[in-house]
Image: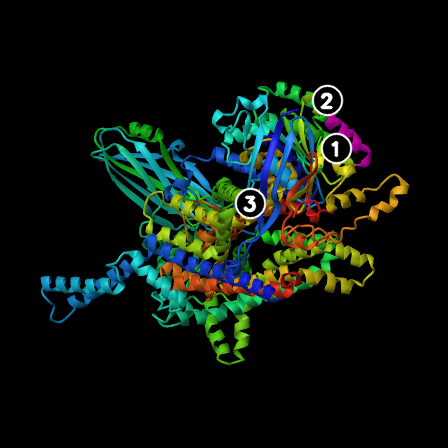
Amino acid sequence: MSEIKLKVTNLKKYFPIRRSVIDVLSGVPPRYVRAVDGISFDVIEGEIFCLVGESGCGKTTTGRLIARLIEATSGYSLYKVSRNIKDLIPREVFIKEDYLNLFGKLPNAVDKSLRLDIQIIFQDPYGSLNPRMTIGSILEEPLIVHSIGSTKEERQEIIFRALSEVKLNPPEEFVNRYPHMISGGQRQRVAIARAMILNPSLVVADEPVSMLDVSIRAEILQLMLDLKKLRNLSYVFITHDLAVANYICGRIAVMYLGKIVETGPTDMVINNPKHPYTIALVSAVPEPDPSNRLRIREVPIKGEIPSAAAIPKGCRLHPRCPYAMDICKTKEPPMVEVEPQHQTACWLYAKM
Amino acid sequence: MSLVSKIYDSWSWIRKEILSQLSGKLALALLIVLIGISIYAALVMPPDYTGTWDVGSKWEDNPHNAPPEWASYLGYTCVPQTYYDLRGFSPALSEAGGRIILTYNITYNLELKEYPRGIMIKVNVTVPQGVRNARIRVDVIKPDGARLSSLMSEYVDLTNTSEIVLKLYKLERVDAVIMSAYRELASFLDLQDINVRPMVYIFGNLSYSEDLKSVVVTPLTGRYVFVIVLDFRVLGIQADTLLRYVQRSREFSLLVKGTCYGLMGTDHMSRDLAQGLFFGFPIALAIGLLVALASTAIGVTAGLISGYYGGFIDEFIQRTVDVMGSIPLLPILILVAQSIAKTYTGTDKPIVMLAAIFAVLIVFSWGGLAIIVRSMTLSIKSELYVEAAKAVGASNLRIISKHVLPQIVPYIAASLVYSTPTAILTEAGLSVLGIRHGFPTWGNILAEARLHGSIRQWWWILPPGLLIAIVSLTFVLLGLALEKVVEPKLRR
Amino acid sequence: MWVCVLGVAEVLARRAVFLTLALFLAVFLTGFVIGATGYMDTIINAIIDEEVRAYRQMLINLPQRPPTDELERLVAQYKQELILYWGMDKPWYARIFPMVLNTMILNLGKAQSPEVTNVAGLAPNSPVIDVISSCLPRTIFMITIAEVIVILIALAVGPFIVYRIGSFTDRLVVAYAATMNAFPLWWIAMVMLLVFSYDLRIAPVRFREVIVHINALLSGDITALAGVLNYVWLPILTIVVVLTGPWIYSIRAMLIKIVKEDFVTAAIARGLPEKQILRRYIMRPAASPIVTNVLLGLAGTLGGFIITESVFDWPGMGTLYYAAVTSGDAPTILALTYIFTLIYVIARFILEILYVILDPRVRL
């Protein structure tokens, strides 16, 4: 069995809500949006680990925390640094062997080295490329920042290779174009090339295909799979689309309001969902088989996802859950194993 | 791609936008002319120009308060400036009792009905050893036959020196000279008027008024003879030797000043206004651009810091802008300038005053730009591509210079364009108010026109104001063209 | 709802605090400039020297002239008294800051220099408050009225041309605005004086004489209006000629922004009559920027146009301020800075309240 690439324990991210002077004076306690509220999961080396959930469930925040674009409120992690950058990091930063804590305070140099090793692909290829920069200079930026390639020609060479790798051929036709001169699928390929050009070992993919035309989604997903095989990458793949998750993921974690409600190997979770929320998600996926059409309304989850600023007490799903019991309104359910490797947080399965 | 080429890209885009409009074309044409003139003027400007503008002796050959020469087309009578180099003339020589007398008879024809503005005789000669002293005397014989004796005269003692350096322009007891020349009118002559306007009596026709109770003066055209007598007391020197010395003098000349001067006329100190206006170009542009560059630089920096880093520093900058915006600029500016004008005594006072005026203008003018840059930075900062740059490890400095700065170039250009004329207009306004730094700016010329000139001297009042307006019009038009770059909603 | 009211009140209270701070800083800064540059000391020393000289002269001319050493002692004693009276024994900040604080509580003191009271047309050493209250109406009679005329013209012409953007009329207005924006108001004033007062001789030359007429008018003599008009028409004409251009341009710019909005296009597409579109869809959203400009513009006029007033030698607030600065009259300078800033700050605060009334989104 492969080693663990990333182990996240009790990760939290609270965004403070701005208070008025009157609030401060009258002693109203500060309030927070609890976007990510204590989640734990493991990513195995070389696997695609999926975070699934509705918009607003905290999955994107989790991705941004792993990519270290925002600081965690609290939480602990063990991240296995790849051999490429191991020598760049001083020994005392490591906690054990090749592992270090991503969410702690790290020296600036370590922070910069880690950016070589962990990359992110964003959802929106229209926003993630600066419209005023050519494809060439967009791809050159990471090289300049990390002083890769000493001459312009050397960098040009790396850029050409990166462009061919994402099937943008011939590369010399693309380097001088601006983002608005290429299609959405091509843009996302450029974004992928930008993430890959630094040769990372962990890539956070934040809904990389959800804004693309359906016809090109499969191509991009296949490209990501090819790159993974080629480079032995690990992915944290964020999506709201169970069909995509089913196609690409090894293991899956379903998130609801900042918590993981169910986790396990993809086929177990999707074919045998246990948590009422997962059941609802799975049944919302249109089935190609007409005989199954009645199953769609089997678990009607009511209403909309509440705001993360006003999280219900007890089980977060209880106001919307058709199986809600008294205990659900007062106590948070613990994570229980329902079959090997398959866990869920629901009082239906927990021993009271 | 470097920052330079980025800015160049933005610039070529701005230029295209500007050139697509009439106002933009006009503005660029004007700007090129202004910059061309300024560079040329700055290159040919004498290094001590700003220091010698106020030195009267530099301008003594010019008529004072003279309109420009082309004013003759507007009905002004322009008597030309007439210069005689006396070294080339042969005087009548006479020698008697240790004295050598050289007499020059110079004919001057006054053709136009106007009084010349002055007479100036300059002598700069080395005489041989043995000349004890010298006397110079000037008589004028008028076309009506009247002889103005000893109109000017000067005595030089040469016992210890052999240099004669003289400038004769002061008139000796001119009232008495006129009276003795026109004895029959003597009782009706206004002596005070003669002393105030001597040239009128020297070059005028004096006659009784119709009621025979006063004297009327009208310009007297015709042939005037200037009799210039050099009277030397010598010891053992030949007359022709002395004459040779005089003919080889460094300067010996007679100047009858005209009534019009040059391209733009002169002021009360006989200064050539064309020169002042010409050299005013680089000074005006320098004042405008210096203030504009400084306040734009501060505004951009403050806006970037405020928007990019946020937090306490943002709050501080925003509140500072807020407070500064409520304080009236002009009163503070006037107060600062006046306080320094009254208390500072160093020789570099003009520079110190200008610097203080600049400082106040700069301190009070960066706020608006800072607010715009801040809001732009805030919106760019939240763009996904900035986050992507952070993800690859780009530093804050890199993000600011590569992703934020190129997008605010149009605003930087607009700010430069808007604040340049403000500085020029304010400096001129302060000068006109009477807070004078003494630096020869257009505003300063206007201020002197208000102080020393009569309101009739249009050639003194109109050109500086027009030039200020043209410079500021250039930037206003440029701003008008830039508006569509900065405010895309105005684009159609 | 109550929470919203509290929120608005908090925003307004916060503004009030900052505007008060700005007010204090303006006066403080002014005091600092007069004090730290030594300007006030220079002026006071000159006053003391002059009084000492006069006192010595008086002693010398006495019938029983005191002996020289006695005379010197008296003079020195008198000088010491003057130094104590003016507070010159203390450092500048110990004199200026109490004055700043007194100004802040409207305890404005007396004008020091005769030039200042001369502008006001009052006796020397009049209270500053009297000096200001006699100059303010003159500024209102000339500059504020001119600005009101300008604003009315701009508000009439702006909406008219906003429908004809790009037309010949529009281009003409823009060209006029650009030209007038480039010319300094005070220079046009000089040219107007040259033409109307000196060349055509149909306007007065000495504008300071208007004091008599305005005083008569203020005391209820309606017939004095003709006299006031005789003086006031040229300055008003000048201001209207110069400022109308920029004003029309800025109103036009505000309206264009709104005309380009989708909701106006939608209203035009629905075929609503032009008048209704103008009133409901253009002027109403434009109200708050226009009111801002109008109010701040009018507030600005109360301080007078310092340079223009000085060119006309018009005895208003601007000329008063200039006289106070050139003669180094600290109490008047501080008081005027205070009044200028106070007017502006009050206008800003009124605007904050008006925004709440005008903009339904702020009100909630």
Residue B341 in the image: state x and y as whole percent: 37, 51
The residue that mark 1 highlights is A181
Answer with left or right where residue B466 lies relative to residue B206.
right
Nearer mark to the viewer, of 2 and 3: 2
Frontmost residue, B464 versus A210: A210
Q: Is residue B11 visible?
A: no
Rendered residue at 10%/62% (across/down): C68
Q: Are marks 2 and 3 on the same chain?
A: no
- Residue at the disc numbered 3: B307
Chain for disc number 1: A
Distance (Cα) linking label 2 and label 3: 38 Å
Q: Residues within 10 Å of mark 2 (few under 14, many from 20)?
A: some
Q: Residue at x 90, y 42 (%)?
A: A291
Query: Which quadrant would residue C3 be assigned to in this image?
Result: bottom right
- Give above or below for C231 relative to B162: below
Tell me where residue A282 appears, x and y as whole percent.
Answer: 78, 42
Q: Quadrant of residue C334?
A: bottom left
Q: Please name which of the two marks, 2 or 1, marks the residue nearer to the observer.
A: 2
Q: Earlier in the sequence, mark 2 or mark 1?
A: 2
Q: Secondary structure at mark 3?
A: helix
Please name the residue shown 63% across and 21% down the image: A155
Q: Secondary structure at mark 1?
A: helix
Q: Residue at x 74, y 37 (%)?
A: A269
Confirm whether circles 2 and 1 share one chain: yes
Identified by mark 1, the residue type is Met
Q: Which residue is mark 2?
A: A164
Give neighbour class at mark 1: few <14, some 14-19, many 20+ (Cα, 10 Å).
Answer: few
Q: Which quarter of the figure has residue C360?
A: bottom right
